[in-house]
Image (cartoon, rainbow, N blue to C red):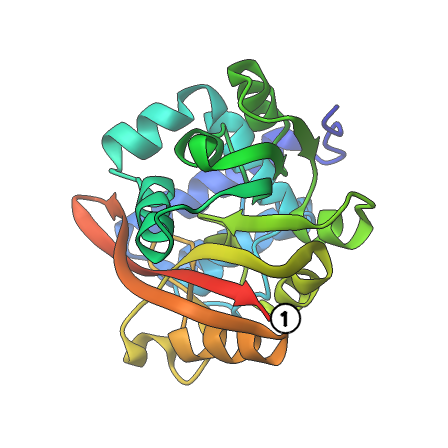
Amino acid sequence: MSETPIFDEDALEQAYNEALKLEKSGDFDGAAKAYQKALEIDPADHGGAAVRLASMGRGAVPVSAPPAYVATLFDQHAEMFDTILVDELGYDVPLQLTDQLEEIDPDAHYARMLDLGCGTGLGADALFEMTEHRTGVDIAENMIAIADEKGDYNALYVGEVVNFLDQTTAPAWDIIIATDVLPYMGELESFFSKIPLNLNRNGIFAFSSETLADKDFAGRDYTVGPHQRFAHKRDYVEKLLLSHGIKMLRVTDITVRSEQGKPVPGHLYIARKV
């Protein structure tokens, strides 16, 4: 079960709502003060104040989105997740991934699949015909509950993906997918270092990312974009894969989703453990 918050929820709501109001009005300095107050009330940062500060240019770029924030965000939207993400935002990355895998190998088939950040199960649905055993992991308990109801996974776990990869004792997988996971991570070394340990030789690692124009990174490998999600530079991702013995097979420029009526650019990576 989710842990009961141990902070003043009314005070947090007041500070956070004030911050959002000020941010919307364009008073970023005032919003920053209100977000800092929210962080003082709730250091675990269930509201994602740290990424909002970074998005406004009023705070350091964190190494990842706070786990409490990610879990809260997706738990709150679980019931309407498929409708919002697919129908309203045009998200179809798992289907794009399926098409790419079939182009690389028309006979693609994987005995064991691990779906990291599985959400409600869009990945299992898209790759159902080319996989036999499917395991899903997500930090949001409500997401896992909906994925379980759909019945496409053989095993489901509630947890943060890097911790899961570090602690699991399950046999290695033949394909690991992580669609819409990197936008909630900044630094990727911890994540990518665990992939080869849980992937069979010649196994596939496929994942998506969001990106921005080079100038928006300001010399960094990753940053928080205007919609409070992380964007990554392609060369940063490719260097990390290579350093962990994962060979790139294909990188495709994609539209990840629509945001406020505009396409969000990103990349779809397909790589193989060598």
Judged left or right of residue 223, residue 92 is left
Q: Amino acid at mark 1?
A: Glu
Judged left or right of residue 29, residue 61 is right
> Is 124 placed above or below 203 here?
above
**Circle 1 sits on which residue?**
189
> Is 27 placed above or below 95 here?
below
**Residue at image coords 63%, 71%:** 189
Residue 14 visible here:
yes
Q: Quadrant of residue 209?
A: bottom left
Dot 1 lies on which element?
A: helix
**Residue at image coords 46%, 27%:** 77
63 and 89: which is toward the camera: 89
- Disc 1 crowd, CA 10 A, few/some/many (<14, 14-19, 20+): few
Quarter holding the C terminus?
Answer: bottom right
Judged left or right of residue 1, residue 223 is left
**Residue at image coords 38%, 77%:** 217
